[in-house]
Each structure stands twice: as structure tokens, then as C-alpha cells.
Amino acid sequence: QVQLVESGGGLVQAGGSLRLSCAVAVLFFDINAMSWYRQAPGKQRELVAAVTSGGSTDYADSVKGRFTISRDKNTIFLQMNSLKPEDTAVYYCNALGRRTILSSMRDYWGQGTQVTVSS
């Protein structure tokens, strides 16, 4: 069962912009935070940006000033500006939450969306 549905990836030239969306497709009792991760070929998955239920945000140093994460109820967005070839990766949506009051907090992942930045 797909819990998180991402959209918005694609091919863009360096300096361009893309906006990713991630919608929560199932009912959660509680979501602590939602985040965007990315994984480039041959590299480990890394945190790009996160937003807590209280609205606090955090960014990887490599994207500060270029990317903006936002949240509207159970959908999060990643506005990516001034894209660079090194931003090329599969971007994954993550939710840290629990489906029921008796569940433990755990990570939920989307299927990933490809972002390719050409030079």
C-alpha cells in the first residue's frame, strides 16, 4: 500500500527550477515530521530538507538559499531554484509518524521521483 505519493520530478537545465510535491495517501494518527531525501547514483541517501509538525524547517548546507520546503496539511512541497547538475538524484519523500495510537513512530517512504539537471 502506497502511503506517500510524490510528483513533480523531471529534466531541467542548470539554473532552472522544479517543484516537488508529496501527498499523504493514507490516514495517519500522528506525523512528527516530513522530509525530502535524495540519492544520487553510487551515493548514500541524504537528507535535503525537513519540516516538523510545528513548522520548523532545516536544510542541508548544499541546498540552503536555493531550496524551500513547505507544508500544507498532509502535503509537502520542495521548491528547488537555481538547480545545479549535482542536484541530480532520485528524490524521496519521508514521513516520521504512526498510523494508529498504539503504533510506534516509524519512517514511511514514497516511491521516489527522478530529478535530472543538465549542464
Image (cartoon, grey):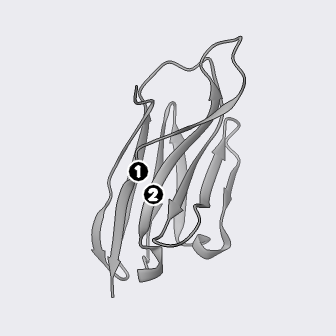
Q: Which residue is denoted by mark 1 in the rendering?
A: 112
> Are the residues flagged by discs 1 and 2 in contact, CB closer than 8 Å?
yes
Mark 1: which secondary structure?
Answer: loop
Please state if 107 lies on the left or on the right of 109 as rendered.
right
Asked if residue 108 is positioned above or below residue 114 in the image, the reply reads above
The residues tagged by marks 1 and 2 sit, at their Cα atoms, a distance apart of 5 Å
Q: Is residue 16 left or right of residue 108?
A: left
Q: Is residue 117 above or below residue 51?
A: below
Q: Position of residue 118 (x, y in %)?
A: 31, 82
Total labels: the figure holds 2
Answer few, some or many: residues within 10 Å of disc 1's Cα (few below 14, many 20 plus, some between 14 and 19). Answer: many
Residue farthest toward the bottom in the current orientation of the protein: 119
How many residues crowd mark 2 within 10 Å: few (<14), some (14–19), many (20+)? Answer: many
Q: Position of residue 117 (x, y in %)?
A: 35, 76
* Residue displayed at 55% across by 71% down: 43
Type of residue at label 2? Tyr
Q: Residue at x 53, y 41 (%)?
A: 71
Q: Secondary structure at mark 2?
A: strand
- For the C terminus, the quadrant is bottom left
Where does label 2 land, which residue? Answer: 91
Residue 105 screen position, x and y as percent:
71, 28
> Which amino acid is tagged 1?
Gly
Looking at the rendering, in which quadrant would you find the N terminus?
top left
Rendered image: mark on residue 8? none
Q: Measured from the top left, where is residue 77 in percent x and y? A: 46, 49
